[in-house]
Image (spheres, rainbow, N blue to C red):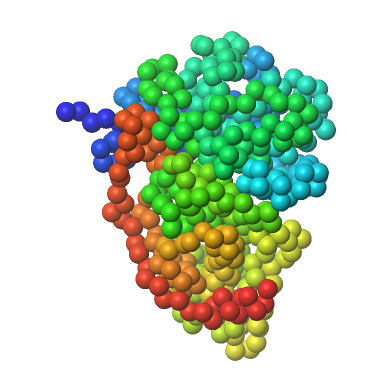
């Protein structure tokens, strides 16, 4: 019997990745990739072009039974009545809406916002971006008929809909759809209520545009023009959690350009401080999340200072004792979001003639990076979400010093999955779920586990310097 194939897409900030999997085993059959433009605002047509290129690079999807798209969260894609973007999409990392976010939080109250939709507005979220559009580009705001997120828009295009003259089925805005994970990052859809809060979007935008219907995790959004089932799609963090097989009790720590800490919870979460965002996941559970600004680039900076590559940085770090002989790096090189210190700078504490060596500086860099992420995990735990295992992902997680020192910083077992492209894999799992009605069970035979080797001195001296 021939194999059944499913495909997953990760349309991230920097690129679009497509992976085709054997439905029965999860084996990656082929992959494709295309780049995205840089910047914090992008013409959505560039994403569509990249998606088509990535699919072609992966050998096409003519033999694929189902496909789902995961994408960067929060971005504002505003469409007019003819299905055209009224302006370039504002991405999650576009901060021009920071004042709008603060104004919305002040008008409604952080506690009330958190109670209603599980988040407190920040510049990343879609709601504040709508307020900015209304206040600064009134003509564009007046032209808006529908508001969607990146994965919603791409899935709509994949099904044959789109601007007049550029799609087979035309601009049927009633066919726009999203999923609960991505909707929960808008600041006007609540993971707890499972509904749009129309009052909040009207306060942000002055009126209620067409909004995509919110699908359940296993629902079908539709089909491609070639007949492949299209799943509901996901936000990128939910896609990663699904691709890793994360379940309640698991925390995921992602060390990329920025750092992300999230845990799977079986109950919704509300944090009026705004530190923890109460998102939904891609299975019907919830995904409380904390983001940090300083992650892998901490290692880049210190490696550059020492004039070594990352392999040598790891060797130097492992040659020093836990606690780096009292040398502590508070790694706020780019300010910090958790804690909220946007104007902070990095600081090196505990320097003495004995402690200031290449080995201890390398060790302090790794410990400082991980302690900053541990602060994020503590914030999630304070909200009553348990974490009995940590899944450590991102490029830096494969650095042997990072994974081994993580087992000393955290007080629970650490696992480094052997999965590449976890977000695209999660989307492919969802595609299989939409196709068959059952979530596929794919294993990770290449995961590496690190037993607890907790060294309290690392966190203790870091906290003492906070």
Outermost residue, bottom side = 354
Whether residue 365 is visible, yes or no, is no
For the image shown, how many numbered marks are present on the structure? Answer: 0
Residue at point 37% right, 38% down? 429
For the C terminus, the quadrant is bottom right
| Picture layout, residue 36 above or below residue 65 | below
Pick whichever, 121 or 341, lies toward us.
Answer: 121
For the N terminus, the quadrant is top left
Quadrant in the rendering for residue 100: top right
Q: Position of residue 5 (x, y in %)?
A: 30, 31
From the viewer's perspective, is 71 left or right of 211? left
Pick whichever, 308 or 339, lies toward us.
Answer: 339
Q: Position of residue 238 (x, y in %)?
A: 49, 44
| Picture layout, residue 36 above or below residue 288 | above
Residue at point 39% right, 41% down? 425
Pick whichever, 147 or 194, lies toward us.
Answer: 194
| Picture layout, residue 323 above or below residue 271 | below
Residue at point 50% right, 72% down? 409
Q: Position of residue 320 (x, y in %)?
A: 49, 81
Q: Position of residue 201 (x, y in %)?
A: 71, 33
From the viewer's perspective, is 20 left or right of 316? left
């Amino acid at each position: 019997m021939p194999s059944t194939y499913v495909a997953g897409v990760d349309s991230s900030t920097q690129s679009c990745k497509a992976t085709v999997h054997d439905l029965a085993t999860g084996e990656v059959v082929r992959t494709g990739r295309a780049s995205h433009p840089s910047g914090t605002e992008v013409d959505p047509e560039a994403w569509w072009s990249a998606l088509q290129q990535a699919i072609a690079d992966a050998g096409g999807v003519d033999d694929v039974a189902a496909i789902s798209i995961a994408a960067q969260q929060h971005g504002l894609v505003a469409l007019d009545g003819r299905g055209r973007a009224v302006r370039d999409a504002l991405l999650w990392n576009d901060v021009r809406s920071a004042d709008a976010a603060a104004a919305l939080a002040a008008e409604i109250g952080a506690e009330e916002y958190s109670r209603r939709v599980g988040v407190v507005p920040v510049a990343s979220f879609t709601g504040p971006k709508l307020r900015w559009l209304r206040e600064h580009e009134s003509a564009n705001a007046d032209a808006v008929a529908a508001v969607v997120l990146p994965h919603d828009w791409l899935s709509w295009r994949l099904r044959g809909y789109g601007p007049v003259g550029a799609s087979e089925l035309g601009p049927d805005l009633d066919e726009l759809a999203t999923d609960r994970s991505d909707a929960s990052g808008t600041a006007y859809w609540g993971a707890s209520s499972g509904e749009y809060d129309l009052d909040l979007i009207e306060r942000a935008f002055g009126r209620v545009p067409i909004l995509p219907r919110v699908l359940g995790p296993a629902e079908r959004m539709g089909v491609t023009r070639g007949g492949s089932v299209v799943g509901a799609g996901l936000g990128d963090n939910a896609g990663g959690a699904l691709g890793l097989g994360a379940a309640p009790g698991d925390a995921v720590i992602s060390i990329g350009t920025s750092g992300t800490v999230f845990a799977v919870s079986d109950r919704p979460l509300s944090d009026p401080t705004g530190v923890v965002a109460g998102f939904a996941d891609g299975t019907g559970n919830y995904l409380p999340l904390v983001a940090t600004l300083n992650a892998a680039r901490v290692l880049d900076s210190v490696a550059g200072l020492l004039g070594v590559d990352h392999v040598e940085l790891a060797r130097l770090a492992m040659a020093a004792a836990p606690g780096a002989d009292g040398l502590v790096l508070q790694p706020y090189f780019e300010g910090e979001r958790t804690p909220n210190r946007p104007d902070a700078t990095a600081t090196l504490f505990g320097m003495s003639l004995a402690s200031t060596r290449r080995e201890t500086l390398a060790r302090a860099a790794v410990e400082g990076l991980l302690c900053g992420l541990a602060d994020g995990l503590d914030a999630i735990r304070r909200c009553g979400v348990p974490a009995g295992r940590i899944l450590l992902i991102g490029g830096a997680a494969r650095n042997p010093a990072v994974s081994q020192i993580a087992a000393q910083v955290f007080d629970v077992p650490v696992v480094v999955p052997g999965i590449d492209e976890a977000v695209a894999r999660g989307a492919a799992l969802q595609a299989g779920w939409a196709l068959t009605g059952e979530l596929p069970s794919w294993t990770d035979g290449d995961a590496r586990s690190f037993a607890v080797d907790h060294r309290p001195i690392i966190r203790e001296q870091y906290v003492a310097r906070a």
